[in-house]
Amino acid sequence: MLEQGATVPAGVLKDAEGATFTLERYRGKPLVVYFYPKADTPGCTSEAKDFTSLAADFAVIGVPVVGVSKDKPAKLKKFAEKYALGVVLASDEEGVACEAFGTWVEKSLYGRKYMGIERATFLIGADGTILRVWPKVKVKGHAEEVLEAAKAL
């Protein structure tokens, strides 16, 4: 997983409408990027709703929030509409960003090993440098913690 001080890797993502973009478009301002396993599952929904509830606070300090998963854009659109989400959801279907950030990892559930996205959040500076990393995120209270760190910039 990328660590504090690393530079954000290049990579192409798609938004919920299927339009391509890169994280480079946010260069010049701080940014929060959070990786989550799967849209419309309990933990991922809670996390997205928590970031959405604080979206206005992030906007006031000029810090966009982007959530990344391997879900297809159509699923992200449905997820965003279902819960009126106020953060950018990005599709990394090919897993390029997940690999580059180090969030595509081997996981284990009931003794079965499989590959999946580790829930992680990155606070990125205006220059594209990672300022803080939250690996293995526990959802409760996480969005508030990230907001406080972003306010301290």
Image (cartoon, rainbow, N blue to C red):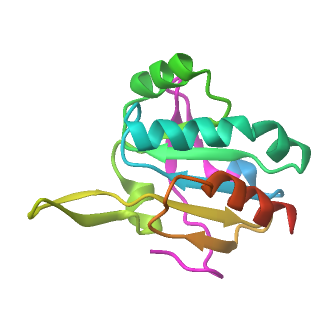
Q: How far across and how far down the image is residue 65, in percent? A: 68, 46
Q: Residue furthest left?
A: 111
The image shows residue 40, relative to residue 101, as above or below, that is above
- In-image side of 129 versus 98 (left or right): right
Residue sitting at x 71%, y 67%: 128
Residue 71 position, x and y percent, is 37, 36
Quick one: quadrant of the C terminus? bottom right
Residue 69 on the magenta span: no
Q: Main secondary structure of the magenta part?
A: loop
Residue 55: percent from left, percent from top: 75, 38
Using the image as rendered, state which of residue 51 and residue 5 is in the foreground: 51
Task: Please say if 1 is above or below 39.
Answer: below
Q: Nearer the viewer, residue 148 or 70?
A: 148
Count of residue discs: 0
Q: Seen in the image, is 87 located left or right of residue 91?
A: right
**Which of the image's four quarters has the N terminus?**
bottom left
Query: Does residue 35 sit above or below 111 in this rendering?
Result: above
Residue at 70% x, 61% y: name it.
145
Q: Write the start and end of the magenta stretch as one range.
A: 1-24
Which residue is painted at 60% across and 67% down in the image?
8
- What is the residue that sits farthest to the right in this orientation? 60
Q: Percent position (x, y) of residue 81?
A: 55, 17
Task: Find out whether residue 16 is within the magenta segment.
Answer: yes
